[in-house]
Image: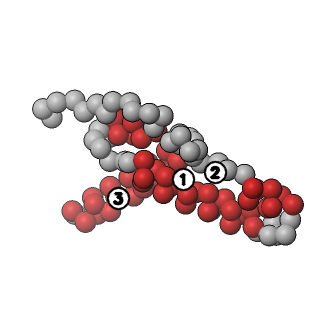
Amino acid sequence: MDSIFQEKQEGPLCAQHCLNNLLPGEYFSPVELSSIAHQLDEEERMRMAEGGITSEDYRTFLQQPSGNMDDSGFFFIQVIPYLFLRVAYQTVKLISFCR
């Protein structure tokens, strides 16, 4: 390694900068993190629907903003482990392929 990678903080994208500095490289963009947050939102919506789509809890849930990101680019903590699982899965696939 010739140099140390450091992604400077730009805006409130702490999760992106944390992950990219940890790995180290430009692996995750706000678009990718947003996509993951939306996937998590959809999984949560489906779980809430299991209690009945006409229930008051479900209707209240639908009125709330995302529980995984906000409009400023802030991603909630549950997005980070999800991304680590994806990286780990891809790494295992690569190792298996190389054997």
Q: Secondary structure at mark 1?
A: helix
CA neighbours of label 3 inside 10 A, class few (<14), some (14 to 19), many (20+): few
Image quarter where the C terminus lies is: bottom left
Q: Position of residue 57 (x, y in %)?
A: 83, 58
Q: Earlier in the sequence, mark 2 or mark 3?
A: 2
Number of marks in the rendered image = 3
Q: CA distance from mark 2 to mark 3?
A: 27 Å
Taking depth in this image into account, of 86 and 43 the one nearest to the observer is: 43
User: What's under tag 1, amino acid-wise?
Assistant: Ala
Q: Position of residue 38 (x, y in %)?
A: 55, 57
Q: Are marks 1 and 2 in contact (CB under 8 Å)?
A: yes
Q: Position of residue 80 (x, y in %)?
A: 49, 44
Q: CA distance from mark 1 to mark 2?
A: 8 Å
Q: Considering only vertical position in the picture, is 4 above or below 29? A: above
**Marking on residue 90:** 3
Q: Residue at x 21, y 62 (%)?
A: 98
Q: Considering only vertical position in the picture, is 73 above or below 7? A: below
Q: CA distance from mark 3 to mark 1?
A: 19 Å
Mark 1 sits on what residue? 37
Viewer can see residue 22: no
**Marking on residue 66:** 2
Q: Nearer the viewer, mark 2 or mark 3?
A: 2
Q: Residue at x 61, y 57 (%)?
A: 41
Q: Residue at x 28, y 41 (%)?
A: 25
Viewer can see residue 75: yes
Q: Nearer the viewer, mark 3 or mark 1?
A: 1
Give the colour scheme shown: secondary structure
User: What's under tag 3, amino acid-wise?
Assistant: Gln
Q: Considering only vertical position in the picture, is 75 above or below 42? A: above
Image quarter where the N terminus lies is: top left
Q: Earlier in the sequence, mark 1 or mark 2?
A: 1
